[in-house]
Image (cartoon, rainbow, N blue to C red):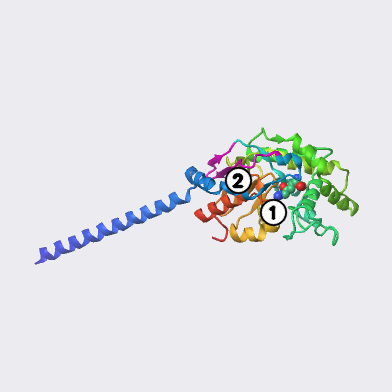
Amino acid sequence: MKNIKLSGLAFGLFIASFFGNYSILSAQKIKKEITIQKTITKEYLTSNLTKNKAYYTKGKVADYIPELGKMQADKIAFSVVNADGRIISVGDINQKFTIQSISKIIALMVAVKENGEEKVFKKMGYFGTDKPFNHFANLDTNGKPLNPMMNAGAILTTSLISGEKDLPYQKILEMIRFITKNPSIDINSSVYNSEKETGHKNRGMFYIMKNSGLIDGNEDKLDNYFRQCSIEITAEDLAKIGYFFANHCTRFDGDKTYFNIEMSKLIESQMLTAGMYEFSGEYARQVGLPSKSGVGGGITVAVPNKKIGIGVFSPSLDEHGNSLAGYHMILDLVNQYKLGLFD
Ligand code: DON
């Protein structure tokens, strides 16, 4: 009788441990599947790009700067720097294009590093906007630009970087080369000349701010803004820039020369509230990540909660001046991997 009881107990223990181990194993398997799903793959980026490429037919390549209009509309590239610094890129990954307004976040970083945040933001606001990027908003009313992402604030920001002639531009260029670890990055002189020849609205803003005493100096200061917009990069460079700000100003290879939590919080908050101009609010609702666009067709995205950087390129733009296919690629990626700040 005692033996029967003991063997019953042993059998019970065997069954419990079998199912116990089985459930641990299945939990591990499920966890592994979730982990695999969270790693962004090249296959996924390719299918995402293929799905969204046709959006280029629904937008328009910027031609208000004539040289930009020469870009082939169907070029497209997608790049991600994962949390461990691993880079995945698909599409026209060697295609260079001008950084345009994305340079504004780097100029802001350099200006704040030199002057401090308080001094810079005494001259401009932290406001969002319902106006296009080249609007004179606020200059005629309270005299101060709305924020450093719209042209007026960006021109002012660059004018606050110290140095004669093109030195402020050189500082911005060097910072972009550092962040991307890409010393071959340089200016596209034809785009620069085209910006300079046709940038009369920007010139108007420059002189209004000079008139009100916000800007001190001659047109060399404005030229630096035209130069910074004309720097040529790739989608991969943009993913590295996104990674840098998502990781408190740590480079994708782990270099912490510029490590600065407050700086990344400032830049990312500007990207979130004004980086996509008048589309920023709707973009925050749909994508929910700090992003910065440029009329060259690039968008850089910082994913601070997952420590990832995203870079996209497709030169055909929507009515706000943001890359149309680029936006849809970002949106699908964010939904697929639940990358949004509010997910
Ligand atoms: O000031 C301009 O017109 C251009 N160089 C930069 C504008 C820009 O990229 C706006 N972004 N979408």
| Magenta span contains residue 72 | yes
Rendered image quadrant of residue 312: top right
Screen quadrant of the N terminus: bottom left
Screen quadrant of the C terminus: bottom right
Q: Give the camera-side residue of 276 and 169.
A: 276
Q: Position of residue 202 (x, y in %)?
A: 82, 48
Seen in the image, is 267 located left or right of residue 94? Answer: right
- Residue with the mark numbered 2: 312
Q: Residue at horizontal 67%, vertical 39%? A: 71
Going by the numbered disc 2, the residue's amino acid type is Val
Q: Position of residue 253 (x, y in %)?
A: 57, 40
- Residue with the mark numbered 1: 319
- Residue 134 can be seen, yes or no: yes
Q: Label 1 neighbourhood size at 10 Å, few (<14), some (14-19), many (20+)?
A: few
- The image shows residue 275, relative to residue 188, as above or below, that is below
- The image shows residue 289, relative to residue 198, as above or below, that is below
Q: The magenta stretch spans which residues?
A: 70-93
Q: Give the camera-side residue of 255 and 313.
A: 313
- Disc on the earlier residue, 1 or 2: 2
